[in-house]
Image (cartoon, grey):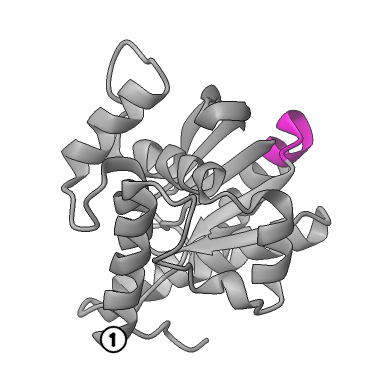
C-alpha cells in the first residue's frame, strides 16, 4: 500500500510518501515541503499547495491520503491557515477518488515513538530509524508528513479503514484493548481517547 502523508501548514506543508509492506515494513518513496511566502495573498498560497498536491498524486499514485486532524489552538490565525491547507488536501484526495484518513498529532506521535507527547526531535529520530535513513528528515514538517504515513500504515486497517473513516465509521476512534495490538498501538489509542476526553474539538469551517 502506498500512502501520502500531509502535514498541513500555510507557510510549510509537509508531504511524505511511503510504501507499506508485510510485517510492518515501510520504505521511503519521496519526501518534501511546499513553501509559500507570507506576503502572498492567501488564495494564491492555497493554490500553490493545491498544485503541488496534484503533482504528487499524479506522479506517485498513492492509494491512500493521510492528513493531520487539526484541533483548535490558542493561535487562531495559525490554526485557520492550517485548517485551510488541510481542507485543500482533503479536496485533492476526493478529486483523485482516493480514501482519506485523518490522524491526530498525539495518535501519530504514539504510533511512531510510543509516546503521544513526544517532542518533534523524537519523531524525527524514529522516522529516520523506521525508514533506515542516513539523517533526520528536515524540516520537522517533512518528518511529520512521513510520520503520518507510517501511522496509517501501522493502524492495521489499510485502505478499507480509511474508507470507513471517511464516512464516519466506527473505527475513527481506535480500540485500545484486545488481541493483536502492539504496545505502541495501545499507546496511541489511549492518547487519542485522552485528547477527546480533554475536550479537544476540531475548528468549524
Give whichever of 161, 53 is nearer the camera: 161
Dot 1: few (<14), some (14–19), or many (≥20) neighbours within 10 Å?
Answer: few
Residue placed most toward the observer, 136 or 153 = 153
Whole-percent x, y for residue 156 in the image = 57, 49
Residue at image coords 77%, 54% = 98
Q: Is residue 163 left or right of residue 168?
A: right
- What secondary structure is the magenta-colored segment mainly? helix
Q: Is residue 184 above or below residue 132?
A: below
Q: Is residue 53 magenta?
A: no
Q: How many marks?
A: 1
State yes or no: residue 58 in magenta.
yes
- Quarter of the image for residue 138 reads top left
Residue 80 occupies which quadrant of the picture? Answer: bottom left
Against 89, residue 64 (above or below) is above
Q: Position of residue 81 (x, y in %)?
A: 42, 68
Circle 1 sits in a helix, a strand or a loop, which is it? helix
Nearer to us in this view, 53 or 192: 192
Q: Position of residue 144 (x, y in %)?
A: 37, 44
Residue in the image at 39% along x and 66% along y: 176
User: Where does the magenta region start and end?
Assistant: 55-62
- Residue lying at the far front in this picture: please name it: 179
Side of 91 relative to 76 (left or right)? right
Name the residue located 64 percent from the left edge and 69 percent from the top edge: 165
Instruction: Give the quadrant of residue 74.
Output: bottom left
* Residue holding disc 1: 197
Quadrant assignment for the N terminus:
top right
194 or 88, nearer to the observer: 194
Image coordinates of residue 31 in percent, x first then y, are 49, 29
Q: Can residue 105 be seen?
A: no
Amino acid at each position: 500500500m502506498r500512502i501520502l502523508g500531509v502535514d498541513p501548514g500555510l507557510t510549510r506543508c509537509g508531504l511524505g510518501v511511503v510504501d507499506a509492506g508485510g510485517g510492518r515494513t515501510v520504505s521511503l518513496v519521496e519526501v518534501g515541503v511546499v513553501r509559500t511566502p507570507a506576503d502572498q495573498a492567501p488564495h494564491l498560497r492555497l493554490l500553490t499547495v493545491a498544485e503541488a498536491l496534484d503533482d504528487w498524486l499524479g506522479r506517485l499514485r498513492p492509494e491512500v491520503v493521510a492528513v493531520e486532524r487539526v484541533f483548535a489552538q490558542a493561535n487562531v490565525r495559525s490554526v485557520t491557515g492550517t485548517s485551510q491547507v488541510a481542507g485543500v488536501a482533503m479536496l485533492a484526495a476526493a478529486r483523485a477518488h482516493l480514501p482519506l484518513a485523518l490522524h491526530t498529532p498525539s495518535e501519530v506521535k504514539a504510533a511512531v515513538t510510543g509516546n503521544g507527547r513526544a517532542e518533534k526531535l523524537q519523531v524525527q529520530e524514529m522516522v529516520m530509524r523506521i525508514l533506515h535513513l542516513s539523517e533526520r528528515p528536515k524540516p520537522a514538517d517533512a518528518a511529520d508528513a512521513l510520520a503520518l504515513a507510517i501511522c496509517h500504515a501501522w493502524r492495521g486497517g489499510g485502505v478499507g479503514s480509511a474508507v470507513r473513516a471517511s464516512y464516519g465509521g466506527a473505527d475513527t476512534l481506535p480500540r485500545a484493548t484486545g488481541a493483536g495490538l502492539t504496545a505502541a498501538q495501545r499507546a496511541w489509542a489511549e492518547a487519542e481517547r485522552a485528547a477527546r476526553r480533554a475536550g479537544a474539538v476540531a475548528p468549524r469551517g
